[in-house]
Amino acid sequence: MRKRTRSGLISSLVVAVFCVVVVHAAQAQSSVPFGREDVKTWQKIPLGTVITPQNWEQYKEFMPAGMQLMFTAGGSWQLPPDFQMVVGPTHNYPLPPLFWQNTEKYSKNVKIVTLPDGRHTVTGYVAGMPFPDPQPPMQGYKFLADTWYEWFPWIYCNHHSWVYLRDRVGNLRTLKTYFVYRELAYNSSVGQPIDDPRGGGVYYAEYTEVVLPEESKYITQLTLYYKDPLRQEDLFLFVPALRRSLRLSSAARCSPFVGTDFIQDDIKGGSFNGGLTRFNATYLGPKYILLLTTADPKEFGQFNNYYLPFLFPKPVVAKWEVRKTYLLDVRRIPSQQAGYCLQKRMLYVDAQSFVSPWADKYDTAGRLWNTESFQQIANFIPLEGPQLYGGDYMVTATDWQNRHQTLFLSAGPSGRHAAGGIACRNYEGVNEDNIERYSSVTGLSEILR
C-alpha cells in the first residue's frame, strides 16, 4: 500500500510539473497549435540563461543564419566580447476578438487564383485572417497572405522615431523621422468600418517624413497600397528643394528606404512589404527563435543602451524570449524576377501575431546580403489592449557585403514613442486622423505650410 501511495504521489508530481510547463507554453502561444514537442523545445533554454560570444553555439538552433553570423563575422562587424543575451519568459499577446470574429465569418470565402504569367492573388478577402489554418496546396503562400493581412491598429503614429546609420569605417549619422501609417480597408479594429469610404481604393498608406538633420528636413515618402492586389503600389517622394512631390517608379522596390539599409520591400508590420502578387513562398516548417517583445521606451530609446560598434540591444533594454515562428522561403515569381535584387528572403513569421520579426535576405548569387532583426515591442492600443504590432519596434538592418548598418527605433532619448488607434487623434496636440493630409498625395503639398 505504501508502495502504491508513493508511486501515486510520484505520478501526481510528474503530471503537475508537466501541466505547469504546458500552461506556461500555452499561455505563451495563445491560439497557436501546441503539443508536447513544443514543451521539449522550450525547456532547452532555461529562464535566466545568459548567452554570450563564448557559449552561443550551444543555442544556435534558436538563431537564424543572420544572428549566427553576428557572432562570427569578425572585427567590428560581430557582437563584442562582452555581449550578453539574457533569456526571459515568453509573453502572450492574443489578437483582438474582432479579428477572430471576422476570420470565422469571412475566411471560408478566400481563394487563391493563379494568373497565366505565374503570379498569384487572393479573391474573396474581406477582413480577419485569410487562411487561419494554412494547409497544402500552396501552404507557404497562404502563410504569406496571413502575414500580409496581419492585424494592426487602423492607425499608428510617431513623432519620435530615431535612425542611426553606421558605415564601414564606423562613422555614425542620425536621422529623426515622423510617421503615420494607416489601414483604410480590410479593417478589424474596434469602432472602425471594414472599408473606410474615404479610402479611395487604398488598402494601406505609409507616410514617413524626415525631421532631422536640418539639411534633410521635410523629405517625405508616401506609399499607397491598393485593395486590388493586382494593382501596383504608388510611391511618392516630396523634395523640399523643389517644393513638390515626384512619383517614383513602382518597379524600384530595391531602392533604399529614406536612405537606410532597408529597401522598399522590407518594412511593414515586420520584414516583408512586397505585396502578394509578385511573390511565392515555400513553407519550411516551424522554427523556434530568440526574439524581443517587451521593453520600456525609456530604455530602448536610449542609444547608450546598445552595443557599439555593432548596433544591438544590451540586457538593460529587455530579455529575449523563445517564440514559435513559421519559416518561409519567399521568392519573386519567375516572370517578376528580372532586375530584382534578391534571390530569396528567409522570413520568420511569429506564430501568434503573424508579424515577421526576422528576415535573412540573399542576393541573386545566393549569398547572404542583409539581415533584418525587426523586434516588435508590444504597445497598448486603446480599445484593443497590448498588441505585439502596435507601432513600437527596435530594428537592426545589417548589410554584410557593403558593411553598413541601420538601427531604427520607435522611441527617442525622451522615452516618447508610438501611439495607435484613437490616441492618434490627439497625439502631442496633433490630429493624425486626417486622411487627406497623411494618407493621400494632396497632403504632400501641405508639408511646408
Image (cartoon, rainbow, N blue to C red):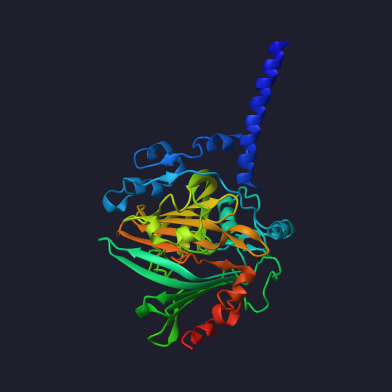
Q: Quadrant of residue 189?
A: bottom right
Where in the figure is residue 26, as x and y percent of width and height? 64, 42
Residue 72 is left or right of residue 192, and the answer is: left
| Residue at 62% over, 58% down | 386
Residue closest to the eye, 147 or 398: 398
Residue closest to the eye, 57 or 105: 57
Q: Is residue 34 visible?
A: no
Residue closest to the eye, 328 or 314: 314
Q: Is residue 366 visible?
A: yes
**Quarter occupied by the N terminus:** top right
Where in the figure is residue 244, as x and y percent of width and height? 44, 87
Where in the figure is residue 57, as x and y percent of width and height? 38, 38
- The total of numbered circles placed on residues is 0
| Residue at 70% over, 56% down | 100
Residue 103 is left or right of residue 238, and the answer is: right
| Residue at 61% over, 48% down | 136
Residue 230 is left or right of residue 266, and the answer is: right
Where in the figure is residue 305, as x and y percent of width and height? 40, 56
| Residue at 55% over, 34% down | 40
